[in-house]
Image (cartoon, rainbow, N blue to C red):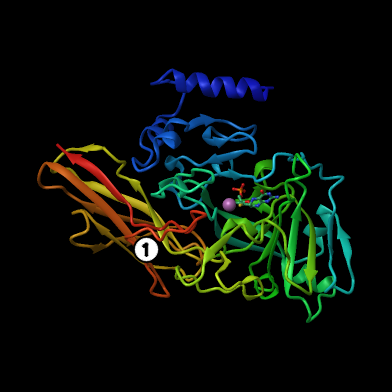
Amino acid sequence: MTTRRAFLKRGAGLLAAGTGPLLPAPLFAAIADMPPELPEGARESAVLDALPGKLPLIKRTYRPPNYETPLAYFGEAFTPNNAFFVRYHLASIPEVNEADWRLRIGGEAATSPFELTLSQLKKDFEPFEVAAVCQCSGNRRGLFQPHVPGVEWGPGAMGNAKWRGARLRDVLAKAGIGKDAVEIAFDGADRPVIAQTPDFVKSIPAWKAMEESALIAWEMNGAPLPHWNGYPARIVVPGWTATYWVKHIVSINALAKPLSGFWMNPAYRIPKGKFPQVDRFVSQETDVNMPITEMVVNSLLTNPLPGQRIRRGTVLEVKGIAWDGGYGIYRVEVSTDGGRSWQASELGPEHGRYAFRLFSLRFTPGKSGKLAVMARAINRAGATQTFELIHNPAGYHHNVVQRVEVEIV
Ligand SMILES: Nc1nc2c(c(=O)[nH]1)N[C@H]1C(S)=C(S)[C@@H](COP(=O)(O)O)O[C@H]1N2
Ligand SMILES: [Mo]
């Protein structure tokens, strides 16, 4: 068995080796070609490191563990479990043992509270599967100019997976959820290390919990959830940012009044009226701000890489992925002349309205020199990406159109 320490050492050694033959080439590319806009600190501190059971990911912080998926894994519509990003607020993360794990469902707006074992959760409710993007609200925060405090994520604090589990609404119905339920609150098994840190508890509006695809999921891409992604079960809220997707879920409470607490307010707030966010979380709104809800439409170029040299007269395949908060991707336009003209790309198969959608466009550069490739996604609600950063203090909803400069030689 490889110890965690050996793992870390090996990871560090590989990086120090520079052209390290042991590390798959795409991973090196992922680090070397981190967005040039990332602040120096974030680029230099980007170390590939493997948590137990995971491939080497981009380490942002070790305690609590915050690890980002390298660009190389976004070439496919589904993100492999062992390359899926990891984000925690609290550093005490128990290894949950299936035999001891219980999920308690109750709260003041539920008449029949009860407890579930994992096998009951799997057996007693009709399973449902949904492909959905799990994206941190702060994905790409590291690209904010001026910088804002928080984990300096590049573009890889996200992933797309097939989530399988029981519908929240079925489990809540069994607990006798009442009409007075305003919010459904989630708590996971992880805990703060010091008493002063508030426990991570999140809620969603009752209407959102009642949607067909809101789940208590125990499976990810056909396998049990990895420890770091919430074993044995996590909340899945398709369309909404990952802050609500509570991992290692141990209690679900139907509340008759809004949840208070640090992670609801002041955390995870956006200024009112600045973003094209459609879903409302009315019970949590204030005069000046509101909770982040659904993801804004976005895309990521996976090919070419910044600074890549491409031979004139050869075919360049511009590739990437697009996603949004659940309206579905309608079209992705690509520019190969720095934004002067745009062409519709070819979309890959649709895996449902919450999933990554691949896009590609082939073109042959005719003259040498620098060239800027860009992509902008448009969803079925007609929303598109922004060209100018919408600044906000927490660094959320970064969906600025990317510009990847390459050199034609
Ligand atoms: N128990 C627990 N669940 C949690 C969190 C956490 O700190 N603890 N962080 C949330 C946030 S902010 C994100 S971005 C996602 C990350 O999911 P992942 O680690 O599976 O990629 O988990 C969410 N669920
Ligand atoms: Mo997050």
| Residue farthest to the bottom, as pictured | 179
The residue under the point 54% across, 66% down is 294
Q: Name the residue under label 1.
A: 385
Image spot of residue 266 (x, y percent): 62, 59
Question: As drawn, is 238 to the left or to the right of 249?
Answer: left
Q: How many labels does the image show?
A: 1
The residue under the point 53% across, 56% down is 137
The amino acid type found where label 1 is placed reads Gln
The residue under the point 50% across, 18% down is 13
Quarter that holds the N terminus: top right
Image spot of residue 254 (x, y percent): 79, 69
> Badge 1, how many Cα within 10 Å: few under 14, some, many 20+?
many
Image: 185 above or below 227: below
Image: 306 above or below 242: above
Question: As drawn, is 120 to the left or to the right of 140?
Answer: right
| Residue farthest to the left, as pictured | 367
| Residue farthest to the front, as pictured | 287
- Give residue 175's quadrant in the image: bottom right
The residue under the point 64% across, 35% down is 63
Secondary structure, mark 1, is loop
- Give residue 290's quadrant in the image: bottom right
Question: As drawn, is 139 to the left or to the right of 342?
Answer: right
Quarter that holds the C terminus: top left
Specify whether tag 1 is near ligand 2 (CB below 8 Å).
no
Image spot of residue 21 (x, y percent): 42, 20
Image spot of residue 206 (x, y percent): 70, 73
Q: Nearer the viewer, residue 111 or 197?
A: 197
- Give residue 174's quadrant in the image: bottom right
